[in-house]
Amino acid sequence: MKTLIEASHLSLNYGRKAALQDLSFTIPAGRVVGLLGHNGAGKTTLMKTLVGLKRAEGELRVLGLDPHADRAQLLTSLCYIPDVAVLPRWAKVSELIRLMTGLQPAFSADRARQLLKRTSVTENDKVKHLSKGMVTQLHLALIAAIDAKLMILDEPTLGLDVMSRKSFYEMLIDEWCDGERSVLISTHQVEEVETLLSDVLMLDEGKLVLNISLAEMDERFVALSHDPDAAELVAANHPLLRYRVQGRPAALFDGVPPDAVAHLGQRVRPSLVDLFMALTRKPERQATEA
Amino acid sequence: MHSWNDQAPIYQQLADRLATQLLDGDPPEGEALPSVRTLASQYLINPLTVSRALQALVDEGLVESRRGLGMYVRDGARIRLLHTERQQFLQEEWPRLREKLRRLGLKPQDLNWEDA
């Protein structure tokens, strides 16, 4: 199976508020997909929909299953860390491994022990004695020991210090990304995850504003760093965003900028953070800052 | 985390780093490059991005893919690389450097050509 998630025209309302608006996308095998968006953009709602905890209108297939109708089967064939995930504080690591063995048929205790060797967590540790970073590593080790094709992580590194985040991403890249398995990961640390990602889904107020691979992103968006003198001319050619790169003014264009502007500046790499700023800022805020 | 600049796409920056290492003979001609997964882990970069970087080196004729074995440094890669690096220096870096030397009023005899 090459396509792991196939979503078309997903919509979901909370009362009168549209939480998801007509989302269509696919996630193939072997990808690391970043789900980016401000708080309240719909990231958690989308993830819950994908694992069958919420029901949206539209067509949705996850690992070939209907997440709502086949939820029990789906939950045994993917790995999911929700944003509110906690491990029981009283439990010992060895007990969690035993618990997982009983709950999850695709879980391998040996694999979990092997993954834990990367960390400083031992089987005799109790969860309540571990630091937040260690608990997150333990959690990742437990779910990465499930033989599955898809992992869904809702802000897994929230509240972790930089070293813990780095160890987390290292384990993810080393132990999960084998070219066949995919992971969908939501985060606010856009800058940090940029190099880890193969694809980006960007949500703004329930709408999918960007659905692109990093390779395509390099081709499609052009950033120009230019002299302050050229600012007016650049602005007149409708850039998505104006910002600064190393103190110099820069402008981000969707597509190749007009010739009149292209020669005024030097092409630089548009970063994911710049794109995020450009595509998810609220119009009224853009107007007041301009 | 590794630092990447805003000047070029990540895959291009990784390809440049690997090329610089090849120029220093690491790895030497005829030897294998680290695997995609090893490089992905070492630089904390997505494996698909690493593959793009390696493909760029293939396109420049520096490495070749051997089926089932991975990427190998091609014979003559160092010479080819040295040639392109020299061209690039003369066309892009030297004019800027010369400009700076002129601004500072430095003459060839002011420059120390031997190692300190």
Image (cartoon, coloured by chain):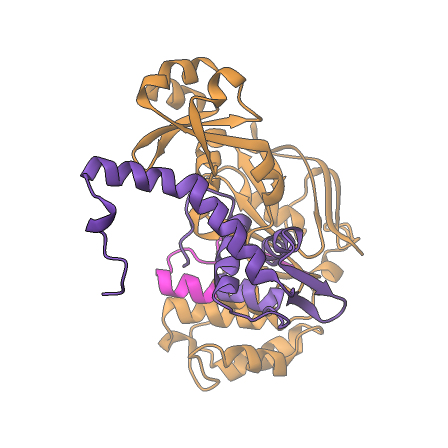
Chain colours: A orange, B purple
Above or below, comparing residue A173 to residue A269 in the picture = below
Residue A52: image x %, image y %? Answer: 68, 51
The answer to which image quadrant residue B96 occupies is top left
Magenta region includes residue A165: yes
The residue positioned 59% from the left and 54% from the top of the image is: B53
The answer, for residue A186, to whether it is visible in the render is no
The residue positioned 62% from the left and 39% from the top of the image is: A216
Of B103 and B36, nearer the camera is: B103
The answer, for residue B22, to whether it is visible in the render is yes
Above or below, comparing residue A284 to residue A280 in the picture = above
Instruction: Report whether A206 appears left or right of A127.
Output: right
The residue positioned 77% from the left and 67% from the top of the image is: B67
Query: Which image quadrant: the C terminus of chain B?
Result: bottom left
Residue B106: image x %, image y %? Answer: 20, 43
The answer to which image quadrant residue B74 occupies is bottom right
The answer to which image quadrant residue A215 occupies is top right
Residue extending farthest bottom: A124
Of B107 and B22, nearer the camera is: B107
Above or below, comparing residue A254 to residue A268 in the picture = above
Instruction: Report whether B66 appears left or right of A281.
Output: right
Magenta region includes residue A114: no
Give, as a single range, the part of the protein colored magenta.
Answer: A149-168
Residue A62: image x %, image y %? Answer: 73, 51
The residue positioned 44% from the left and 12% from the top of the image is: A236
Residue extending farthest front: B109
